[in-house]
Image (cartoon, grey):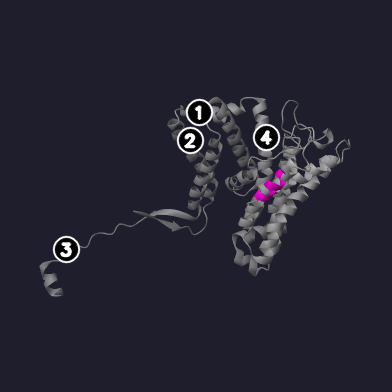
Amino acid sequence: MSRLEARPEPSRAMMLASPLIAAAAMLATGSLLFLFLGHEPLHAFRVYFVQPLSSSYGIGELLLKATPLILCGIGLALGFRANVHNIGADGQLTMGAVAAGCVALYFDGVDAWWVLPLMLAAGALGGMAWAAVPALLRTRFNTSEILVSLMLVYVAYLFLGYLVHGPLRDPAGFNFPQSKMFGESATLPLLVEGLRVNAAFPLALLVAAAAWFFCRHTFAGYRMQVSGMAPAAALYAGFSEPKNVWLAFMASGALAGLAGVGEVAGPLGQLQSSVSPGYGFAAIIVAYVGRLHPVGVVLAALLMSLLYIGGETAQIELQLPSAITGLFQGLLLFYLLAADLFIHYRIKPRARTAPPAPLSMETARHES
């Protein structure tokens, strides 16, 4: 028999290996799933993971879908490092898209260079404003930021639906729930002609570099990390918990809002009833798979983007249901959480105890 024993200190090797273990376990489970669905696993994995990268268009789509995951994932990772759990990035993304869309529609027909920067600023402020609600309730009334930020996601969805069905609906759009198409000055420039990946991707990489610098070389980043790893030590050192909560929510809200701008000013080009297929929720997995490190978040976002594109390809080529994408994402998170157990614990075999020796007749007579 074996038992779990607490490690004297967290295992750095397991911290780095657990994402790889989780990915391998996800692939093993996926093989069984494909067999159950009647598909040869190697062919199915080729369709799912290799075929999307076999063309320049596929690589462009990979980078396009990775962009909002990078932005949202980095914002969430900053908060998670400080033990601030923002689960509402998808709502903040939606409100950032709404704010940027309102700017684009207000200046419709204005051909000026400053329209797009104004949209980016409005999107960041929109995401920050939505993130300020759980931050305020957490710091003033000690409410659960997890529940508040999560519930606000659905409020943001309903607000966007109201706008595109009502005040912002395109009068020439045949009654579809969508706004007018944005003008050229309100759309992000493409990186490569013929591909949909746009200037939001290099912006996301710059954000990742800035986040790395913030975490490694600023006192605020150090303060957030100490607050997450050792709350008692942070309290003893005089680090302000409300300040960390506000900083975490404002950073994640601003980055999620920028991700929303990248969607409506990029591939969508307008406000629609839905501007995100769940990027804000998938970014939670991205943050943890990336070990809450900016470089890791970028790599994890590329993997998660591949799961999105591979799922779409599998629907077409293998006639698999759309839920296959969510299934692989859930498996990845499940196995990651399981593997993370061994960062702080290890399996130790129980020492075998020898059975007691039988008593001799003389000893038994003496004891009686």
Q: Is residue 115 above or below residue 56?
A: below
Which quadrant holds residue 52? top right
Q: Earlier in the sequence, mark 4 or mark 3?
A: 4
Cα distance in 3D space between marks 3 and 2: 54 Å
Residue located 72% across and 43% down the image: 260
Horizontal arrangement in the rendering, residue 331 relative to residue 243 (left or right): left
**Residue 7 shows in the view:** yes
Residue assigned mark 2: 30
For badge 2, the amino acid type reads Gly
Residue 360 locus on image (x, y percent):
13, 66
For badge 3, the amino acid type reads Pro
The local secondary structure at tag 1 comes to helix
299 or 14, which is in the foreground?
299
195 or 107, which is in the foreground?
107
- Image quarter where the C terminus lies is bottom left
For badge 1, the amino acid type reads Ala
Observer-side mark, 3 or 2, equals 2
The local secondary structure at tag 2 comes to helix
Cα distance in 3D space between marks 2 and 1: 9 Å
For badge 4, the amino acid type reads Leu
Contact flag, marks 2 and 1 (Cβ < 8 Å): yes
Residue located 65% across and 30% down the image: 59
Q: Earlier in the sequence, mark 2 or mark 4?
A: 2
Horizontal arrangement in the rendering, residue 332 relative to residue 36 (left or right): right
Image disc number at residue 63: 4
Q: Is residue 120 above or below residue 232?
A: above
Q: Earlier in the sequence, mark 2 or mark 1?
A: 2
Residue 187 locus on image (x, y percent):
79, 35
Q: Residues within 10 Å of mark 1 (few under 14, many from 20)?
A: many
